Image (tube, coloured by chain):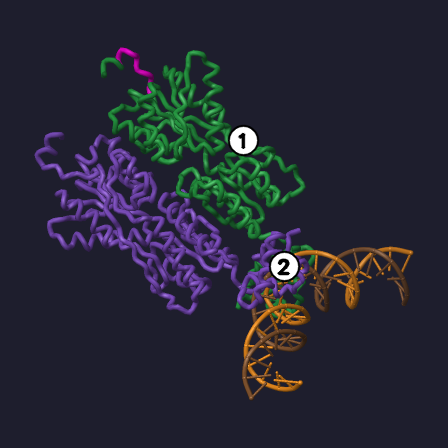
Chain colours: A purple, B green, C brown, D orange
Amino acid sequence: MAVSARDVARVAGVSVSTVSRALSRPDDLAPETLAKVLETARMLGYRPNPAARGLITGRTGTIGLIVPDLENPFFSSVTKGVQARARAAGYGVVIADSDEDPSQEADLVREMSRQVDGVVMCSPRSPDDVLAALATETTLVLVNRRCGSLPAVLIDNLEGVRLALEHLRALGHRTIAYVGGPATSWSNRARLTAARAIVAEHPDTELVDLGSFQPYVSGGIAAGDLLIASGASAALAYNDLVAFGLLDRLKQRGVQVPDDISVVGVDNIPMSALSSPALTSVGIPLVNCGRAGADVLVSLLRHPDQPPTHHHDLSFQLVVRDSTAPRRSSESLRDTA
Amino acid sequence: MAVSARDVARVAGVSVSTVSRALSRPDDLAPETLAKVLETARMLGYRPNPAARGLITGRTGTIGLIVPDLENPFFSSVTKGVQARARAAGYGVVIADSDEDPSQEADLVREMSRQVDGVVMCSPRSPDDVLAALATETTLVLVNRRCGSLPAVLIDNLEGVRLALEHLRALGHRTIAYVGGPATSWSNRARLTAARAIVAEHPDTELVDLGSFQPYVSGGIAAGDLLIASGASAALAYNDLVAFGLLDRLKQRGVQVPDDISVVGVDNIPMSALSSPALTSVGIPLVNCGRAGADVLVSLLRHPDQPPTHHHDLSFQLVVRDSTAPRRSSESLRDTA
DNA sequence: CGTGATGATGACCACGTTTGCATACTCGGC
DNA sequence: GCCGAGTATGCAAACGTGGTCATCATCACG
């Protein structure tokens, strides 16, 4: 069916080895032989069979990507970055969605481990020891998750949370709620820890931990009433989706954002500019995050001897929109009550 | 390195053929032999090499998916559906993003054609003849695009547009604008044609075609001023993102939605419930759309002899939210002017 | 007890490519 | 003019699996 190297060899009047060399090591061939082979290959539409190549080289030319939820804009963007960069480097991308289920992640890696040269795991929910075990079975790069000295693309959560909290403090807020994501989420724990550390620097400021919620809009809706009851004048949400849920529930309860309560999200997804009110958010260029992940993995595959530990930090930036405002003075609060 | 069938054979004291048969045709083996082989395979952690298998069978156990933009929530959802269903059927998914560039689509298909058993193309922008040519090179299934008798998962655009327009007509709107998507988009043309046909049924109603815009929020922002100038009291947007752009620009210009102008989107993406005002939209369960695409492709691969033409229609449903309202009477319009 | 049928299993080739090694050929220097 | 060095190319093995065919054992039946 498909045209093989043998066909090219026959037509060009050379051996199969020469055809192979024409593509893998052109310098080893006489210029006129090279030209002849390349020309007939082009004419016949020859395309090397990746399975046969992979069988002998052990490389597949493909990398894997595992994300918790493809529908989440955060992971969509990362996926786009990984895909673009991998393709530019000549790699294909096979994708898998763990549906936010930590126990699936390891299975997915093992399922695809024979078909890929390495795997990028984005925001994995699995515990450290599971990830460490996976790293011994395949070349693994983490995105948005630190685990020992495994190669990782990290986001400086401390800096991001600091940007958000200092913004709120500058607006006069002194009681700030944290609306958390999944308890198994590494970035959630990192952000909570960061928030505690930053608040600890300011004796006049208090952090109220409202607990863990689903990383979706529904999670924010569920947390809305707790936020109102907490007495906090501002909230930092685990991510923008949760923040949207908060906005929705607060509006429903008749609580004004930002007049009564300020809300800050994390991720700065494209939709943040369009909510009502438009969401103040700290975020990073997510596509870059994916790009960096693919780059690290590819360079690891190309130079297996290089030090396996490689951390790459990306910076947050604060985008102020309409969901944050100066804290109302107590009097004006009493006015509306 | 990795444990091969030969290793299992040696340990189990059987031949390589027997190991192969244990997995591919268990019925041909004596029960005790089967048990022994399976047990040692499990013990040794044997996993067949997909490259070697693919080399001989010609099948890869992988399907391809090509979408115009991974960051677009529409395609994210479809991707999720395709991925979930493919994996359930034992197939991996390699993904590629054409960046809305029609000329890239064919290249992408050809690039991956040797590594996959078939390809799902979602909303391809390429012309019919290009798609027909691709279908001769690989097993192709289209989603949200009709092209001759190629197998496709289709959305009944006529019905969807009818739902939207009849909703607006029922609210009293008689001059309705259509804010189009890319000119190369098949679904855009289908929707415009559908809108014209439906309006033609009602002599008292007029359709204003505002032209083609980018299928992003920016496209809607660009179209906003044209909409205001058009004199239409309602607009149907190519998709929800464009509708968001419209909402944004209209708000900026001081035009009230839905009081002055009603807006309807298409796709009903999750974010539609959260915009301000919440967007009335006609949509289909997008994840199902992806699922259907994967199902059609898998069944085509499993039963190559079945009639290759297979159309699968999915229905729209109208979700009414806050961006549509009865048309203001001329007097009240004059009042505000 | 012999013969044919049935069923289980092993030996071997093929798939398409890469790669080490052998070989033939070229060219420069003495 | 011959030899060594270097270079271009062919040969053949190997990667791990699936499938075909032959072989051998077992068993039923005549």
- Give the x, y percent position of residue C30: 56, 88
Q: Which mark is residue B313?
A: 1
User: Residue at (48%, 53%) from the top-left corner?
Assistant: A92
Q: In this view, does A260 lie above or below B139?
A: above
Q: Can residue B200 be seen in this view?
A: yes
Indicate which label's residue lies in the foreground, 1 or 2.
Answer: 2
**SS for tag 1?**
strand
User: Residue at (44%, 64%) from the top-left corner?
Assistant: A302
* D18 to the left or right of B254: right
Name the chain letter of the residue that bears numbered label 2. Answer: A
- Give the x, y percent position of residue B54: 60, 56
Q: Which stretch did the figure color magenta?
A: B325-332
| Local crowd size for mark 1, using a 10 Å CA cut-off: few (<14), some (14–19), many (≥20) | some
Q: How many labels were placed on the picture?
A: 2
Q: In which quarter of the image is residue D12?
A: bottom right
Q: Is residue A250 magenta?
A: no
Q: Which of C25 and B182 is in front in this view?
A: C25
Q: In which quarter of the image is residue A30?
A: bottom right
Q: Can residue B39 be seen in this view?
A: no
**SS for tag 2?**
helix
Q: Do labels 1 and 2 share a chain?
A: no
- Label 1 close to label 2 by CB (< 8 Å): no
- Give the x, y percent position of residue A107: 47, 55
Amino acid type of the residue tagged 2 in the rendering:
Ala
* A42 to the left or right of B171: right
Q: In this view, does A167 lie above or below B324?
A: below
Q: Nearer the viewer, residue A190 or A211?
A: A190
Say which residue label 2 marks.
Answer: A5
How far apart are the alpha carbons under marks 1 and 2? 43 Å
Q: In this view, does B34 lie above or below A207?
A: below
